[in-house]
Image (tube, rainbow, N blue to C red):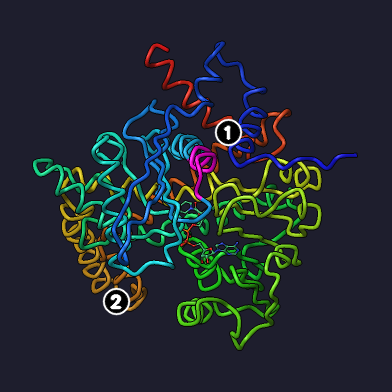
């Protein structure tokens, strides 16, 4: 018997898409129109560094322009290739539709290992890559708005915004050409943490529904649940930190490139993060057991498994051995289509990537709106809101004095109630609302349709229906 072949990342996304559209009645041809990637631009450019010219290969793929601008991160990694970028661009289309961020899907990548280059070299490479994309309108506030992804962060986004400004000197909206910028470069509070925060909000929403928790063979609340996380980068670090510090979860394993740390009593996420920053990996960390074959820890006993590093890590080879009853896909595409089949048959509940990591694009949407409106959220209304609250407090205190000692407002209540919402509170509130409503829309399909047995298919059904409706509204 020949071994079953693992599909590529893009094939995996297409297979999952096909499983969902088989349950829909789309007009002939529309299914194909939605599935295919509209265009992928490949660029090879040279940069003079360390006394010689180095050639780099980059991509920007546009999956669907049913809404513009299109949106999607730029990734720096050695594994970047056209197949991967197209898969990620397709996921962006479905993700934006699911969480109602008014964008089409796109993604970019540059094949390089950022750890091999000095900061000033990375700046030269990033600016040159941005130049190539900007001159083709593949970075543009109205047409294509990148964001950070694996290997990139606010530093790279600031370079891109500045490069765009140099080339589009009269564009008053230049800051909206990219999101995930530093706060002093036109960014928004809460963007860096947004994807990890979204994972936390998604899990909180899941645990609000005892029926869903029971579907994963669990009971109770988030408090006390054991979590295994793979990748302590932007997404994994924030998710693990918030879940352990705010929701009472125990992070029993952290998997990184060089191995995994295990501690059944719970690892200190902040301390591990600091250790990695100083030593480049988890090896040698004193408060936990180290194993060199980190991926083995994906198979550890735990309630919640959070793959937050890269695609394809849960695959035909290891899926049958995964013990976690609940997987939340913080990374894009961590479970291959083949593994998804195996896990579904085992009864594992998977909270799919297009929903689980949508916190990033949601807050990116807020940042883009902030950049276009040229004003910080809360700036106009905050003090007015506080003044109105003060009125109520004054009135209650007047009554209090009148009624004597029978009741009193707690000082904590007064302080909390009086505080008007600043940008961070508003961003978190918008993110929480988005994660809750998107979950509700998936869950309705999951529970109400007999032919839908998993959250991923439900997510695809919801998002494809929205993309199809946009195309129909355009007369297609
Ligand atoms: P990052 O570069 O900040 O972090 C990735 C982490 O994973 C790093 O700590 C790296 O050392 C680790 N890692 C890499 N390969 C690994 C391996 N084979 N085994 C174990 N650990 C490994 O990247 P990120 O921004 O946190 O992105 C992680 C995933 O989340 C990607 O799939 C990305 O597409 C997805 N994502 C990111 C965002 C965002 O806002 N940054 C938004 C949505 C989705």
Is 43 within the magenta? no
Q: Is residue 50 above or below residue 463?
A: below
Q: Residues within 10 Å of mark 2 (few under 14, many from 20)?
A: few
- Look at discs 2 and 1 and give the one toward the viewer: 1
Q: Label 2: state its secondary structure.
A: helix
283 sits left or right of 138 in the view = right
Q: Tell me which corner region of the image, top left, top right, bottom left or bottom right, holds residue 257.
A: bottom right
Q: CA distance from mark 2 to mark 1?
A: 60 Å
Q: Main secondary structure of the magenta part?
A: helix
Residue at screen point 29% across, 58% down? 48
Q: Is residue 237 above or below residue 285?
A: above
Front-most of 96 and 226? Answer: 96
Front-most of 346 and 12? Answer: 12
Q: Residues within 10 Å of mark 1 (few under 14, many from 20)?
A: many
The label number, if any, that marks residue 106 in the structure image: none
Residue 139 percent location from the top left of the image: 28, 41
Q: Label 1: state its secondary structure.
A: helix
Q: Residue furthest bottom?
A: 286
5 sits left or right of 222 in the view = right
Residue 180 percent location from the top left of the image: 33, 55
| Residue range corresponding to the magenta coloring | 80-88
- The quarter of the rendered structure image containing the N terminus is top right
Residue 193 percent location from the top left of the image: 41, 62
Residue at screen point 38% across, 27% down? 65
**Label 2: which residue?**
404
Q: Tell me which corner region of the image, top left, top right, bottom left or bottom right, holds residue 158.
A: bottom left
Tell which circle, 2 or 1, labels the residue nearer the N-terminal end. Answer: 2
Residue 241 percent location from the top left of the image: 51, 70
- The quarter of the rendered structure image containing the C terminus is top left
Q: Residue furthest left?
A: 170
**Label 1: which residue?**
460
Q: Marks 2 and 1: CB-CB under 8 Å?
A: no
């Amino acid at each position: 018997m020949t071994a079953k072949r693992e599909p590529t990342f893009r094939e995996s996304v297409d297979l999952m898409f096909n499983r969902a559209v088989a349950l829909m009645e789309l007009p002939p041809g529309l299914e194909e129109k939605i599935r295919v990637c509209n265009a992928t631009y490949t660029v090879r450019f040279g940069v003079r560094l360390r006394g010689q010219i180095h050639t780099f290969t980059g991509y920007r793929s546009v999956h669907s322009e049913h809404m513009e601008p299109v949106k999607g991160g730029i990734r720096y990694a050695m594994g970047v290739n056209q197949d991967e970028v197209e898969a990620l661009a397709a996921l962006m289309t479905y993700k934006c539709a699911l969480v109602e961020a008014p964008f089409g899907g796109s993604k970019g990548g540059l094949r390089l290992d950022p750890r091999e280059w000095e900061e000033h070299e990375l700046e030269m490479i990033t600016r040159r890559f941005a130049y190539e994309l900007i001159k083709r309108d593949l970075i543009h506030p109205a047409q294509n708005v990148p964001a950070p992804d694996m290997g990139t962060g606010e530093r790279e986004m600031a370079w891109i915004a500045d490069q765009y400004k140099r080339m589009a000197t009269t564009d008053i909206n230049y800051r909206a050409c990219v999101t995930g910028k530093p706060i002093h470069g036109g960014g928004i509070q809460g963007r860096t943490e947004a994807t990890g925060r979204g994972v936390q909000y998604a899990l909180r929403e899941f645990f609000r529904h005892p029926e869903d928790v029971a579907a994963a063979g669990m009971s109770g609340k988030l408090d006390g649940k054991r979590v295994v996380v793979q990748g302590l980068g932007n997404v994994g670090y924030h998710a693990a930190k918030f879940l352990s510090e705010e929701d009472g979860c125990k992070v029993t394993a952290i998997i990184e490139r060089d191995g995994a740390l295990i501690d059944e009593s719970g690892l200190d996420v902040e301390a591990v993060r600091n250790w990695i920053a100083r030593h480049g990996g988890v090896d040698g960390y004193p408060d936990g057991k180290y194993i060199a074959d980190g991926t083995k820890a994906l198979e550890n006993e735990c309630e919640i498994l959070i793959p937050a590093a890269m695609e394809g890590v849960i695959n035909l080879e290891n899926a049958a051995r995964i013990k976690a009853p609940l997987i939340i896909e913080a990374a894009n595409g961590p479970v291959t289509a083949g593994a998804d089949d195996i896990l579904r048959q085992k009864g594992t509940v998977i909270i799919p990537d297009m929903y689980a990591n949508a916190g990033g694009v949601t807050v990116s949407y807020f940042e883009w709106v902030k950049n276009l409106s040229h004003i910080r959220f809360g700036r106009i209304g905050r003090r007015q809101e506080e003044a109105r609250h003060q009125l109520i407090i004054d009135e209650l205190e007047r009554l209090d004095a009148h009624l004597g000692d029978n009741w009193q407002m707690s000082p904590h209540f007064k302080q909390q109630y009086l505080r008007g919402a600043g940008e961070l509170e508003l961003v978190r509130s918008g993110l929480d609302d988005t994660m809750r409503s998107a979950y509700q829309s998936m869950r309705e399909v999951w529970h109400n349709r007999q032919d839908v047995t998993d959250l991923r298919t439900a997510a695809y059904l919801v998002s494809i229906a929205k993309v199809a409706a946009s195309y129909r509204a355009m007369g297609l």
